[in-house]
DNA sequence: CCGTGGATTTTTATATATAAGAGACAAAAA
DNA sequence: TTTTTGTCTCTTATATATAAAAATCCACGG
């Protein structure tokens, strides 16, 4: 009744660790594993027991030893390592992005539970998350209203994002050049330049860099509301990135250059320049999103599911 | 297994309606009641049946009639009209404000469920709300971290609030003088003046006026994130208002005057003046809160409950 | 004493169960 | 027809049940 996803995730993680050990090497103690995998010792013991049963590690007391290297088939499928709740969130976001729901549509928890193959408890608990995203509105004792990823949504999220990011830069430039955030900025800038040098082949790794830069800035605000909001932005973009991949290389190159300008402005500590560069970059990003929303991100609904309006 | 709080709330609401009818008057139809009370006809029917059983309305077909006026004892206690979830939220907030938790403390859902006398399902689902408030942090597969109503919390919430409110005023002053928000502002201003005239006896009704003014401004932003955030601010202040009632009359008078200045600035549509007045008012409010947090809002914990760190 | 591993107790995540409430349909009344 | 009410079905809110994971406790070997 609880799904053993923690076990499976830990097991896989453990296999990855072990792949690097030589056969016959002594394994870490249970508590060391527990720290390493960031799970309880209870789970570690379950993993080690399984490992022994699979003949990967010798079981028993006094000296656990690696017996053979893990094979690809030893791993659990990644799908099974997501908790029921996380799976609901992911599937829901995917349905949204595939256009399975229409703006204004009423969704009912019972039907979603059936369609997602989980219990209503899980649905209820995790759908609440999307309320916070501004994508759902709860009607007490009734269905949920899906508000849609509309141009309005994009405008509202970007308005707040811009306010927050500009505010965060004010804190950022107060910090000393050798403070951790500035160090991290150095690293990020270097990676930008490295990526730019290989943009033809590597352009797909831009989103991670984008996430790191903006998160760094938001986080130095030290304001939990700003940071929480960036989590929303980040998740949302993680999913929407796939919508429109036309001109991907070109768009990423432009964004990369805008980032470098933005970083340069930060270094200058000239608030006016920072505002200008930041705004410019966000305007570009906003336009890209708006374009995605305006035409094709949503496929024609394969079948109007989860409906009840 | 579901608590009939909707029924009880509707029943009470219905009694209040009926109090104004003359004996023998014909009652509205089921569907009319349904619209009036904003509940399903199913609930209305349950209420009407109860009403008949209590001898307040005649039952049966063709012409339901008021038979006697409801007495105070006919009403359900207000306490029972809160859904389990709403009750959890309220009680939790009260515990926080009474200092039953310490910042940094770990709360576990099982124990809270026992202490609040509800199921863990309800606790889990509604505690998530306070994550959004920035008061709790969820540790997957583990307890919740209570982050505390600290000076930091106050600073962060006010920073965002100021940003949002200033932004909202920019939309506000774009609207025509005869648009609904400005009409509402006229009404609110009039009520401010009325309150000011009777401040000696009526000062306790200031918080409602405060809520109306600020909500009006936030709502005209048309940005769901700004409006949602104001819900947080509003709930938080609703509870914290009770912390420190010293100088209440004086503080409310000052705030009232600040509001009038702020409204005047809005009418001038001079952004500079608006910013100044708004900031000034928020600074006062922030200082009041900071003072409450700094000393005694938290009583010495009567007993360290819900602990598990 | 320390860390290590075994066993036991609690707590969490999630499914299932069920009463209250919403909504749909049909018959009766107007 | 249009409205009102009776009946039935489906959904939501919430409690309970239970497997998985965490936390705690304990004994043992250094």
Image (spheres, coloured by chain):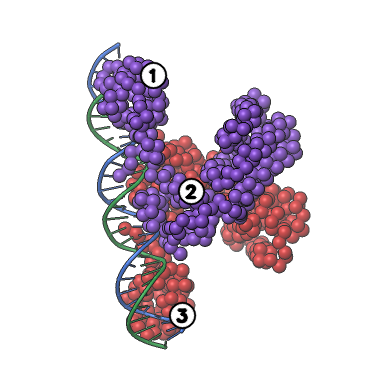
Chain colours: A purple, B red, C green, D blue
Residue B207 position within the rendered picture, expressed as x and y whole percent measured from the top left: 58, 57
Identify the residue shown where x is 47% and y is 36%. Answer: B104
Identify the residue shown where x is 35% and y is 27%. Answer: A71
- Secondary structure, mark 3, is loop
- Secondary structure, mark 2, is helix
Residue A41 position within the rendered picture, expressed as x and y whole percent measured from the top left: 34, 29
Gap between marks 1 and 2 measured at Cα: 39 Å
Gap between marks 3 and 1 measured at Cα: 84 Å
Residue at label 1? A21
Please tell me whether residue B175 is drawn above or below residue A228 in the rendered image. Answer: below
- Parent chain of label 1: A
Q: Can residue B174 be seen in this view?
A: yes
- Parent chain of label 3: B
- Parent chain of label 2: A
Q: Is residue B92 visible?
A: no
Q: Which of marks 1 and 2 is nearer the N terminus?
A: 1
Q: Nearer the viewer, residue B16 or B231?
A: B231
Closer to the observer: label 2 or label 3?
Answer: 2
Q: Which of A168 and B207 is in front in this view?
A: A168
| In the displayed structure image, the side of residue A75 where residue B290 appears, left or right | right
Q: What label sits on residue A211 in the rendered view? A: none
Identify the residue shown where x is 58% and y is 59%. Answer: B208
Q: What label sits on residue A93 in the rendered view? A: 2
Please tell me whether residue B255 is drawn above or below residue B187 in the rendered image. Answer: above
Which quadrant: the N terminus of chain B? Answer: bottom left
Q: What label sits on residue B21 in the rendered view? A: 3
Which quadrant: the C terminus of chain B? Answer: top left
Gap between marks 2 and 3 measured at Cα: 51 Å
Identify the residue shown where x is 25% and y is 21%. Answer: A60
Residue A2 quadrant = top left
């Amino acid at each position: 009744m609880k799904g053993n996803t923690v076990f499976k995730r830990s097991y896989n993680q453990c296999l990855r660790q072990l792949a690097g050990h030589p056969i016959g090497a002594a394994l870490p103690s249970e508590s060391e594993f527990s720290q390493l995998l960031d799970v309880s010792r209870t789970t570690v013991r379950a993993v080690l027991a399984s490992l022994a049963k699979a003949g990967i590690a010798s079981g028993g007391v006094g000296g656990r030893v690696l017996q053979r290297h893990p094979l690809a088939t030893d791993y659990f499928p990644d799908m099974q390592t997501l908790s029921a709740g996380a799976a609901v969130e992911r599937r829901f976001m995917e349905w949204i992005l595939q256009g399975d729901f229409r703006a204004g549509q009423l969704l009912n928890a019972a039907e979603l539970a059936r369609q997602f193959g989980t219990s209503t408890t899980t649905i209820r608990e995790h759908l609440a998350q999307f309320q916070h995203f501004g994508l759902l509105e709860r009607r007490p004792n009734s269905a949920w209203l899906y508000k849609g990823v509309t141009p309005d949504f994009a405008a509202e999220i970007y308005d707040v994002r811009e306010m927050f990011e500009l505010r965060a830069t004010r804190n950022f430039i107060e910090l000393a050049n050798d403070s951790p955030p500035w160090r991290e900025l150095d690293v990020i800038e270097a990676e930008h330049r490295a990526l730019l040098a290989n943009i033809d082949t590597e352009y797909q790794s831009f989103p991670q860099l984008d996430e790191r830069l903006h998160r760094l800035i938001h986080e130095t605000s030290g304001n939990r509301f700003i940071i929480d909001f960036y989590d929303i932005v980040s998740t949302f973009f993680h999913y929407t990135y796939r919508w429109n991949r036309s001109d991907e290389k070109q768009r990423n190159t432009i964004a990369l250059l805008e980032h470098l300008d933005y970083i340069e402005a930060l270094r200058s500590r000239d608030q006016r320049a920072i505002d200008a560069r930041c705004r410019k970059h966000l305007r570009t990003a906003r336009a890209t999103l708006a374009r995605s929303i305006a035409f094709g991100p949503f496929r024609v609904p394969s079948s109007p599911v989860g409906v009840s309006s």
